Amino acid sequence: MISTVVIALDLFTKHLVQSALVYGEHITITSFFNLVLAYNAGAAFSFLSDASGWQRWFFSGIAAGASVLIVYLLRKHAAEKLFCIALSLILGGALGNLWDRITLGHVVDFLDFHISGYHWPAFNVADSAIFIGAMLLIVESFRHKEE
């Protein structure tokens, strides 16, 4: 359920931004936040975005493989609530970005935070879900487990 909500919210917000902006355009929201339409053909922080195109299928394969592994882990550890919430967030984010890679050849990013002229790389709802899921996995790893 969580993954489905993440995917739906991710695709919906990307659709809204693509409908409102042209590539490279930005709308200033606050002194530290803009909406911008950016495309990322690479991975996190635009890693390999300037490669010749092979990275589209490479990162799609990684996302698909990770998604299969996550579904397996969700079934195996269904009783571990925080672990499953974390994995569900990561799964939703991975599938949201995978959809973009397969259908568009790049990931649509639009959240642009900045301070004093320094910009964090633009990101999207899927990236946020992956980040939050990863942080929850770290928290989960420190929780005491009864043997």
Image (cartoon, rainbow, N blue to C red):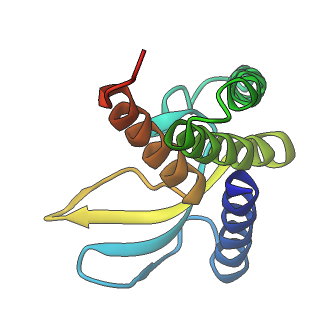
**Looking at this view, is 93 or 69 the one in front?**
69
Residue 58 versus residue 138: which sits nearer the camera? Answer: 138
Residue 57 relative to residue 117: left or right: right
User: Does the rendering let one see residue 56?
Assistant: no
Q: How many marks?
A: 0
Residue pictured at 46% horizontal, 65% vertical: 111
Residue 129: x and y, percent? 53, 51
Percent position of residue 122, x then y: 45, 55
* Image point (59%, 47%), residue name: 89
Looking at this view, name the residue that lies furthest to the left. Answer: 116
Left or right of 102 on screen, residue 142: left
**Can the viewer see residue 125?**
yes
- Left or right of 129: which side holds 71? right
In this view, 147 is above or below 11: above
Q: Which residue is drawn at 69% across and 21% down?
A: 62
Q: Residue furthest front?
A: 147
Residue 109's image quarter?
A: bottom right
- Can you name the residue that lies furthest to the right here? 103
Quadrant of image for the N terminus:
bottom right
Q: Quadrant of residue 69?
A: top right
Q: Quadrant of the C terminus?
A: top left
Q: In this view, does 116 lie above or below 122?
A: below
Instruction: Give the percent coordinates (x, y) of residue 12.
Output: 73, 71
Residue drawn at 60 percent across, 52 percent down: 126
Q: Front-most of 36 and 137?
A: 137
x, y percent for residue 142:
29, 28
